[in-house]
Image: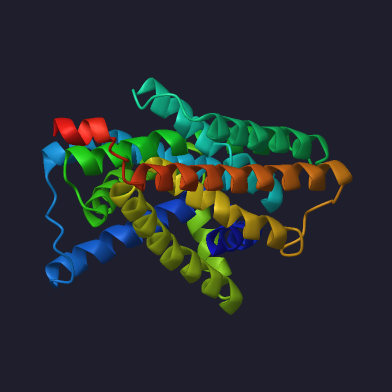
Amino acid sequence: MAMVFINKAVLMQYAQSMTLLTLQQLATTLLIHFARVMGYTKATGFNVETAKRLILVSLFYNANVAFALASLKGVNIPMYIAIKRLTPLAVLVAGYFSGKGIPTIQVTLSVILTAAGVIIAALGDFSFDLFGYGMAFTSVFFQTMYLVLVERSGAEDGLSSVEIMFYNSILSVPFLLFLIIATGEFPDSLSILFAKSTSLSFLVILILSLVMGIILNYTMFLCTVVNSALTTTIVGVLKGVGSTTLGFVLLGGVQVHALNVTGLVINTAGGIWYSFAKYQQKMKNKLPRVVSDAEAHRK
């Protein structure tokens, strides 16, 4: 929840989102490397074959974060969170096509309600930014793809969340360096960064952004490997309830309209219903099956 506000606060002072992401991945790589050397983690060293299998995870991850950061430049936080709540729908669709089956009626209806809330809220968003919305929707697609791949990597390759995070950060650096050069951010982004570093408040939120970004990535990969991609998106929906409320009063940039508020309320209701439906489904699956007298006799 805090990461959305911290990123928004950083981008309000330092708009070079690609450079910010590059710094985060460099910090992650160095942290895990030294932790492994000093014996704080049992993560294995770099393996070329494993890196080849995880190249798509890294590509989709960085595309997701890059488009998400770009969208925050033009989309206010409540609308950004509402759009990102379309991720469970995308994960469910991806799960269906990957052979996970058709979701229950409650899950389907709750996801439709969530999507309807996004559309209604968008109609009431006076600060509508076509570029920002496009970036946010593209981010949803890439987030879906990399979460599904992370889940598969943990299950099939037996990799821990730290190892997936380590490979992701290493593979991200060359890709991001190419992007900051191709987009023209470099070298101006470094000179702007050095000029901004004289401000203590900027340094604090920058360091917070780097540190909390590492923690967020670790817990997200851990949740996806231990549970599933769907569980990670459900947690994201629940997180969005608090973030949406705070987004109206923090950092500014939000023009409140009845449609906007109504849409976000519907979106939140859909997210809560979705989580409740999945919880019911999980509890139902845990109930012991009642064995009939005839079955008991046959046994």
State the image coordinates of residue 11 (x, y, percent, origin top left): 61, 56
Q: Quadrant of the C terminus?
A: top left
Residue 178 visible (yes or no)? no
Image quadrant in which you'd find residue 215: bottom left
Q: From the viewer's side, name the closer residue of 158 and 56.
A: 158
* Image position of 189 with respect to 284: above or below: below
Extreme residue in the right direction: 258
State the image coordinates of residue 185 (x, y, percent, origin top left): 51, 46
Q: From the viewer's side, name the closer residue of 269 and 9.
A: 269
Residue at image x 59%, y 34%? 111
- Numbered-mark total: 0
Q: Is residue 36 left or right of residue 73?
A: left
Q: Is residue 262 left or right of residue 290?
A: right
Residue at image x 44%, y 24%? 102
Q: From the viewer's side, name the closer residue of 237 and 191.
A: 237
* Image position of 153 with respect to 207: above or below: above
Q: How is the image coloured?
A: rainbow
Q: Is residue 229 left or right of residue 194?
A: left
Residue 1 visible (yes or no)? yes
State the image coordinates of residue 268 (x, y, percent, origin top left): 67, 48
Image quadrant in which you'd find residue 270: top right
Q: Quadrant of the N terminus?
A: bottom right
Residue at image x 88%, y 45%? 258
Residue at image x 27%, y 53%? 161
* Image position of 50 with respect to 221: above or below: above
State the image coordinates of residue 83 (x, y, percent, origin top left): 63, 40
